[in-house]
Amino acid sequence: MKALTLLSLLILSLILGCRAEQPTRPSGGTEVLNGGGVLEAFQKELTRIVDRVSPSVVTIFALQEVEFNPFEDFDLPFRLPIEPFRQERRSLGSGVIVKLEKGKIYILTNNHVVEDAKSITVRFDRHTERRARIVGTDPKTDIAVLEVDAKGLGDVEKRIAKLGNSDRVRVGQIAIAIGNPYGLERTVTVGVISALKRSIGITQYESYIQTDAAINPGNSGGPLINIYGEVIGINTAIVASGQGLGFAIPINLAKWVMDQILEHGRVVRGWLGVVIQEITPDIAEAIGVREGILVAQVVKDSPADKAGLRVGDIIVALNGKKLDSVRDLQFSVMKTKPGTEVTLTVIREGRKMKLKVKIGELPEKVSGKKPRYEGENLGLSLRDLTPREKARLGVEGVLVVGVVPGSPADHSGLRPGDIIMRVNNRKIDSVGEFQRVMDSLREMGKEKALLLVRRGASNLYLVLNLE
């Protein structure tokens, strides 16, 4: 399918660019059809772009130490007094050189490539390797910045990649991925931008560029480039069960994170202090509003709380700029410098009003806290699965971390360690989604909920009484 897509693109270029000229013969004597010059020009330009960008792409080897418990996947009726084993694991990924300053080379890559690394080696070419230091990481966007001493490396200035503007990327544009899939250094794949602003649930801040340019394990951290040889994204994820589904972090976001790390040693984010959600068609019909973002919770003593924001408010604009999605508000607040006063336009009980809010700094304890649901009337405590747990278990859902004896949750048969995957056949991918479904069922007068639960390696259905 991918080959056909590229072939179609070339045929279109041929049709649009061919001129009425006589067939020519290359040195071998084989006749070339009309328009061969267009294909040749396309081919030359593509190889020129790759030749220019490839020296910017490096291979990253990270030596990681991980914990391993051989019994953690078994549903045992007792605890074994065994400490997890610690073992070394080598991680392979890619990176792109983006900066040279005061004799130091700075490389962008993914956090998951270097996470928990004891040592990191960067290979610049077949004969040149250097030890690297982690300047900083940001798990919330899966970005990491590495530093390497430039001493002894030739033509360093020519290795620095040119960064593009990912805000100008459009669906249908040509995309080129360069990386080291399975250790095959500087592999080049070509495709198109197939979607923008994708969210796939692996990090907290997501607005991925989707591409059908082939991306495989080892490509992580490598660049996605445009036809001008500019980096427009950092390749980071694939859908393992699909084809042509690769995802890259927009370079504007990656650069912002890098600048924060280089300036502060960490990422300083703005903080409003609300839990927000999209207005679905059902919610829109219920509240009579079809725009903005719904405030589901206000954190006590947060900037939002101090400004008078309330649960049920609908935020429609920030500093006069219309907000179309949760992502719009999330990223706008994140990039606002703490201490800055902003104006929120809010719909409350049918009328518009404006609130002045002084943006705070996202606290570490809030940013690192796993979302939980404490349903006292159900006797149930939940939290979101981490990306690592999702990958290891191969399921989506929420984890049961506590069940009150004698409660409806207890009577239903739920146990700590269960994973709730569906409620009334609706997929549950977060604590917030579970709570919204519960509230919706109660509003409809439902007395029971049918839960699909993963316990150990098996699925089972349980009935939870909502009364």
Image (spheres, rainbow, N blue to C red):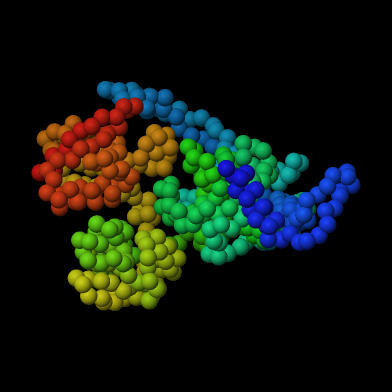
Q: Quadrant of the N terminus?
A: top right
Give the side of residue 181 with respect to residue 300, left or right.
right
x 26%, y 46%: residue: 434
Q: Nearer the viewer, residue 202 or 197?
A: 197
Q: Is residue 225 visible?
A: no
On the image, the x and y values in percent for residue 40 come to: 77, 53
Q: Nearer the viewer, residue 416 or 227?
A: 227
Q: Is residue 451 above or below residue 253?
A: above
Q: Quadrant of the C terminus?
A: top left
Q: Is residue 126 visible?
A: yes
Give the side of residue 337 with respect to residue 226, left or right.
left
Q: Quadrant of residue 20?
A: bottom right
Q: Is residue 407 above or below residue 221?
A: above
x 58%, y 64%: residue: 165
On the image, the x and y values in percent for residue 360 come to: 36, 67
Total labels drawn: 0
Q: Quadrant of residue 100?
A: bottom right
Give the side of residue 109 with respect to residue 352, left or right.
right
On the image, the x and y values in percent for residue 323 come to: 37, 68
x 37%, y 62%: residue: 325
